Amino acid sequence: MQFGNGWKPVVAPAARLDVLRVGLGAVLGLAIAAVMVQLALWRGVQGGWALFAPLGATAVLVFAVHTGPLSQPWSCVVGNTVSALWALLVVACWPSQAPDWLLPAVAVGGAVAGMQLTRALHPPGGAVALLLVLEAQHGVHHSWSYAFLPIGLLTLALVLVGVAYHRAWGKHYPLQAAAPQAAGKKELHLQSDGLSNADLQALLARFDQDYNLTPQELGQLVRAAEEQAISRRLGSVTCAQVMTAALWTCRPTDDVDKLAAQFRQHPIKSLPVTDAQGHLLGVVARSALFDWLWQQQPHTRHKQSRSIWRLWGRKPAAAASVHAAALMEDAPLSVEDHTPVLHLLETLSQHSVPFVAVLRQGKLVGILTRTDVMRILMELAL
């Protein structure tokens, strides 16, 4: 029966270091708040100690769930302050003929609505509103300034301690949300998943997670899931399984005529240069052959066009002494045949290379292009 599963723990188990970090942070934050309350009590400000009930709940959010939207500085400070202001307003305007038992419900309900209107939903704000009306019912009344001092000030102090504490541990707080886009501008899409912020927000609303995750956090989770899936699928695929083994190569002693013939016969942009044993020596690019021809011919438009045409039919006399060794460059990238394709994805995304040479014990056994990688990605995706 599914009913029993709903009562099981859903919070992931915490690491011991995280337990220590969160506990120490709450101790530090509330200790500083306690010092501030004590100083306020010396000056005759009463009621500060009662605030530790909602502040304790705020501390849980700030130090244990610091990435959640409800734990961000705006939600904490504005949420508690707005709730206090609403509770004080309800107490001041409550009709004498109205039943007192309804006062807490109206205070908390209005506080929740006020926090939603100000986009500052913060669960401890409900406790702040409830605390103030209960104190009023027991004869403890506060002025309007009480919403800001000590409630707003203590909450702000707790948040500032959280900011410094999380940064000391290398954590990110507050959450850096992406800036909203101006009206009329094209909406920014995530590069990896093609989902816009509006798409992510719609998914959060669909699964009732609006107050647990932000679109940015969901986007990060989607990208991380994609990377994990690619890693799992490509982790066992080696370059030898994906490479193109049918090679068109040349020797260092091949002249321009042979090179031109290779480029005419095959739709390639570069030729690997190997020795007699198959060791990779370098690469001759089609563009290098064109550059050499351009430098050798007279610089007139008519003769240039005729010279380029002759290159693909009959070599010029000046090419007799030019060989592949003089035109070749170092091979851009090379890997062993047992290298996982996964290790090449970042390299290919950052470097523009015609191919990656695949070697086995120093000998060229194949080449790997972006087309080969895209093909295997498509096959794994289907």
Image: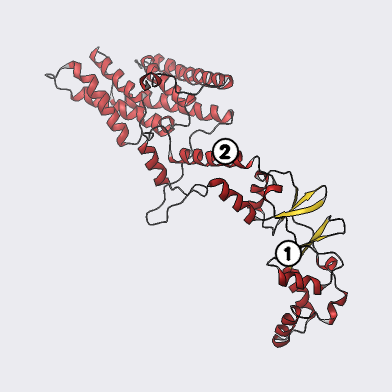
Give residue 143's position: percent from left, percent from top. Answer: 28, 23
Mark toward the start of the polypeptide (2 vs 1): 2
Residue tagged 2: 228
Identify the image quadrant of residue 166. top right
- Residue 156 appears left or right of 24: left
Q: Which residue is most to the top?
A: 138
The N terminus lies in quadrant: top left
- Residue 335 appears left or right of 216: right
Residue tagged 1: 270
- Residue 65 appears left or right of 378: left
Give residue 334's position: percent from left, percent from top. Answer: 75, 51
Q: Nearer the viewer, residue 55 or 183?
A: 183
Sort mark 1 into few (<14), some (14-19) or many (20+) by Cα contacts within 10 Å: many
Relative to 230, residue 169 above or below: above
Give residue 262's position: percent from left, percent from top. Answer: 75, 69
Q: Secondary structure at mark 1?
A: strand
Sort mark 2 into few (<14), some (14-19) or many (20+) by Cα contacts within 10 Å: few
Q: CA distance from mark 2 to mark 1?
A: 34 Å
| Amino acid type, residue under disc 2 in the picture | Gln
Residue drawn at the location 77% of the way across and 57% of the way down: 331
